Image: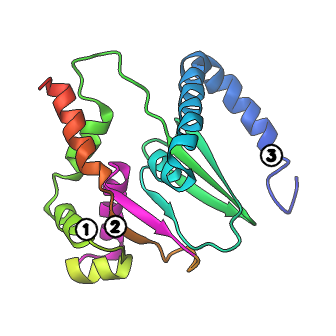
């Protein structure tokens, strides 16, 4: 075993995960990931890197991070609906979720369900109203809304998963994220609602 890390364990675990699970799902899931990655590659020339990162991740905004040289967007199905990011030296990897479409046309789309669930809570609506004009820190949101840190993090996660909230990452470091309303979220709600109920 490698004392400095898990590199001696990782390959066998990945092989086991592949053999026991992914091998059976690969034919269904891999085309979705490839299609999504191809779509994002086409969009890069049309919208620029910063806009593409925000679009793909549903709201990650990279601000002043001096040493950052490369951002890798990685489509994933297994972490959905959450996107995750990590830094390594001058590299940032953002895993963003790709939804698996439903075979049943009568079912509401997953995106619409996330949006309506996020908006069903009065505290989350107040949070959106407060963060509408400029990015706010977690502490500022807690102070104004009178919520504990854990409760506020839950509300922020629900709004981020629904694509209604941006997270601004800057040079201040981890734990100093700021949050603001994602304008595309309201138009997404209208679009998915109208499409589903066939207006």
| Rendered image: mark on residue 132 | 1
Q: Residues within 10 Å of mark 3 (few under 14, many from 20)?
A: few
Q: Percent from the top left, x then y, of residue 194?
A: 16, 31
**Label 3 belongs to which residue?**
9
The residue under label 2 is 180
**Does 1 sit left or right of 171 as displayed?**
right
Q: Is residue 2 magenta?
A: no
Give the x, y percent position of residue 27.
59, 16
State which region is magenta: 146-170
CA gap, disc 1 and disc 3: 46 Å
In the image, 192 versus 116, the foreground residue is: 192
Which residue sits at x=75%, y=66%?
89
- In the rendered image, residue 165 lying in the magenta stretch gets the answer yes
Q: Are marks 2 and 1 in contact (CB under 8 Å)?
A: yes
Q: Is residue 31 left or right of residue 109?
A: right
Circle nearer the viewer, 3 or 2: 2
For the residues marked 2 and 1, what is the alpha-carbon distance in whole angstroms?
6 Å
Pointers 1 and 3 in contact (CB under 8 A)? Answer: no
Q: Residue at x 18, y 34 (%)?
A: 193
Ranked by sequence position, the earlier of labels 1 and 3 is 3
- Residue 90 horizontal side relative to residue 81, left or right: right
Instruction: Return the disc, 2 or 1, that comes first in the chain's sequence.
Output: 1
């Amino acid at each position: 075993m490698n004392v400095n890390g898990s590199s001696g364990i990782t390959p066998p675990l990945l092989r086991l995960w592949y053999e026991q699970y992914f091998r059976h799902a690969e034919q269904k899931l891999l085309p979705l990931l490839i299609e999504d990655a191809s779509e994002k590659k086409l969009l890069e020339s049309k919208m620029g890197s910063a806009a593409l990162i925000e679009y793909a991740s549903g709201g990650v905004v990279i601000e002043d991070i001096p040493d950052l040289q490369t951002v890798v967007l990685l489509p994933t199905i297994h972490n959905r609906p959450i996107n995750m990011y990590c830094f390594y030296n001058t590299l940032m990897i953002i895993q963003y979720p790709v939804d698996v479409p439903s075979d049943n046309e009568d079912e509401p789309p997953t995106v619409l369900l996330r949006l309506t669930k996020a908006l069903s809570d009065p505290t989350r609506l107040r949070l959106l109203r407060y963060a509408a004009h400029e990015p706010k820190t977690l502490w500022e949101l807690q102070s104004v809304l009178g919520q504990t840190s854990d409760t506020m993090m839950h509300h922020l996660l629900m709004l981020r998963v629904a694509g209604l909230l941006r997270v601004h990452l800057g040079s201040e470091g981890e734990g100093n994220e700021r949050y603001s309303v994602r304008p595309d979220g309201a138009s997404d709600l209208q679009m998915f609602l109208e499409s589903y109920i066939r207006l």
